[in-house]
């Protein structure tokens, strides 16, 4: 039972890890934007035919 005191001690706050940055060429940025736009359009088209209570987002 003495182990329980150590098990439930308050943890030290974790430090945030630095975010990774990615550099893309202009062509890659354009292609990525197109991909996101197409995905958004597909999702909107799909959600259009669903009933109001079943729509995502």
Image: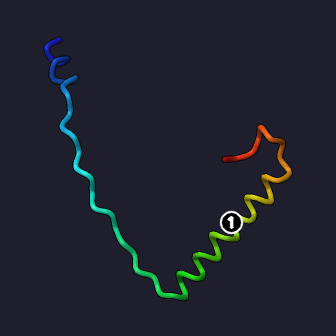
- Is 9 above or below relative to 46? above
Within the image, what quadrant is residue 8 found in?
top left
Rendered image quadrant of residue 24: bottom left
Q: In the image shown, does 30 or 12 lie closer to the viewer?
A: 30
Q: How many marks?
A: 1
Looking at the image, which residue sits at the far top?
A: 1
Q: Quadrant of the N terminus?
A: top left
Q: Is residue 10 above or below residue 43?
A: above
Q: Residue furthest front?
A: 52
Q: Is residue 45 left or right of residue 34?
A: right
Viewed as shown, does residue 11 lie left or right of 41?
left
Residue at horizontal 67%, vertical 70%? 37
Q: Residue at x 64, y 73 (%)?
A: 35
* 20 is higher (above) or lower (below) than 30: above
What residue do we see at 86% from left, 51% from top?
49
Residue 49 horizontal side relative to residue 19, left or right: right
Bin the neighbour count of mark 1 within 10 Å (Cα to Cα): few under 14, some 14-19, many 20 and up: few
Residue at 75% across / 58% down in the picture?
44
Q: Is residue 49 above or below residue 31?
A: above
- What is the image's colouring? rainbow
Residue behind mark 1: 39
The spot of residue 29 in percent (x, y) is 53, 81
Q: Residue 41 location, x and y as percent?
A: 74, 65
């Amino acid at each position: 039972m003495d182990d329980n005191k150590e098990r439930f001690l308050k943890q030290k706050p974790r430090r945030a890890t630095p975010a990774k940055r990615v550099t893309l060429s202009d062509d890659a940025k354009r292609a990525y934007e197109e991909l996101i736009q197409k995905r958004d359009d597909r999702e909107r088209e799909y959600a259009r035919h669903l009933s109001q209570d079943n729509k995502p987002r």
